[in-house]
Image: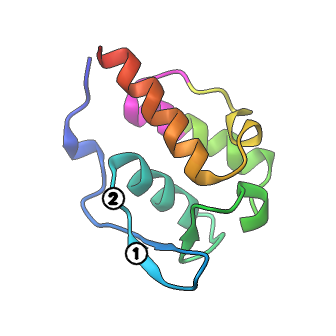
Amino acid sequence: MQRSSSCVPHSTHELAHCDGATARAQTDTENLLTSFLQEPCLSSIIDLNRHLVELGGDSLVAMRLMARLSEAFEIDLSPVLPFEVASLRDLVARIDMMRQSIQD
């Protein structure tokens, strides 16, 4: 079962790059992840090349993040997944792969 796009926030969030430039979230997963991370005031601009812990996240933030992403995309995401990847960009890629495998 695929969720409608209405579950994904329509605004896009700023993403930082290692050269200091910013860009907008490009995918539903990037958009949701950045919106969920901005809520606990970790940062107003999320750098997907950094690890969750580098942005001030901890195990509680990871659990909340994975629960919200699981609900939004209707997939089962482990709360330890953010700690198994090197960066938030890798986390987005893993989630997108899982979403794609379910859709196939």
Colour mode?
A: rainbow
What residue is at 49 percent from the left and 31 percent from the top? 70
Specify start and end residues of the magenta stretch as a single range.
68-76
Q: Mark 2 near mark 1, Cβ–Cβ under 8 Å?
A: yes
Q: Mark 2: which secondary structure?
A: loop
What residue is at 66 percent from the left and 69 percent from the top? 42
**Residue 65 locus on image (x, y percent):** 59, 45
**Residue 61 locus on image (x, y percent):** 70, 50
What residue is at 41 percent from the left and 46 percent from the top? 29
Mark 1 lies on residue: 23
What residue is at 21 percent from the left and 42 percent from the top? 5
Mark 2 lies on residue: 26
Using the image, determine if residue 72 lies above or below residue 50.
Answer: above
Using the image, determine if residue 29 lies above or below residue 76.
Answer: below
* Residue 2, quarter of picture: top left
Any magenta on residue 70?
Answer: yes
What is the magenta segment's predominant secondary structure? helix
Left/right of residue 102 with respect to residue 36 in the rendered view? left
87 or 64: which is nearer to us? 87
71 or 98: which is nearer to us? 98
**Amino acid bearing label 1:** Ala
21 or 35: which is nearer to us? 21
